Image: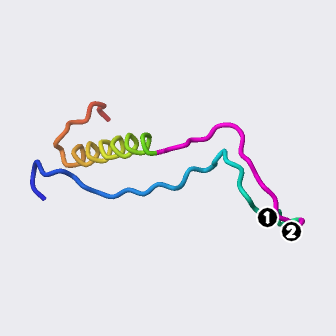
């Protein structure tokens, strides 16, 4: 890798925790088929937020490495 070359990496995210659509499941206590629905906050698509989170985390890591290498001076004196 040389200076000015784009940084490329892969990221993975866990699935959205809840979906508002009714879903089939099994009640393990009674061993019967049932449906569950989630009410309240949910995210239909995490893609727009995922891109921002990946960019922000990349910036934090790059600045941290640059500070450790002495390329960026520390603002707070210890």
**For this view, does 37 lie left or right of residue 66?**
right
The answer to which of marks 2 and 1 sits earlier in the sequence is 1
Compared to 2, does 28 lie above or below? Answer: below
Residue 41 belongs to the span the image colors magenta: yes
Q: Residue 40 carries which label?
A: none
- The residue closer to the viewer here, 23 or 40, is 23
Q: How is the image coloured?
A: rainbow
Q: Where is residue 52 in the image (x, y as percent from the top left)?
A: 38, 40
Q: Which residue was labeled with disc 2?
A: 31
Q: Residue at x 56, y 50 (%)?
A: 16
Q: Do the residues labelled 2 and 1 touch (CB within 8 Å)?
A: yes
Q: Residue at x 36, y 45 (%)?
A: 57
**For this view, does 35 lie left or right of residue 32?**
left
Quarter of the view holding residue 41 = top right
Quarter of the view holding residue 30 = bottom right
Magenta range = 30-46
Q: Residue at x 29, y 57 (%)?
A: 9
Quarter occupied by the C terminus:
top left
Q: Which residue was labeled with disc 1?
A: 26
Residue 76 belongs to the span the image colors magenta: no
Look at the numbered disc 1 and give the secondary structure of its residue: strand
């Amino acid at each position: 890798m040389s200076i000015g070359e784009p940084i490329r990496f892969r990221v993975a995210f866990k699935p959205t925790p809840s979906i508002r659509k009714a879903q089939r499941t099994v009640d393990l206590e009674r061993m019967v088929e049932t449906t569950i629905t989630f009410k309240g906050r949910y995210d239909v698509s995490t893609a727009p937020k995922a891109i921002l989170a990946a960019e922000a985390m990349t910036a934090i890591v790059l600045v941290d490495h640059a500070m450790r290498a002495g390329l960026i001076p520390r603002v707070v004196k210890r």
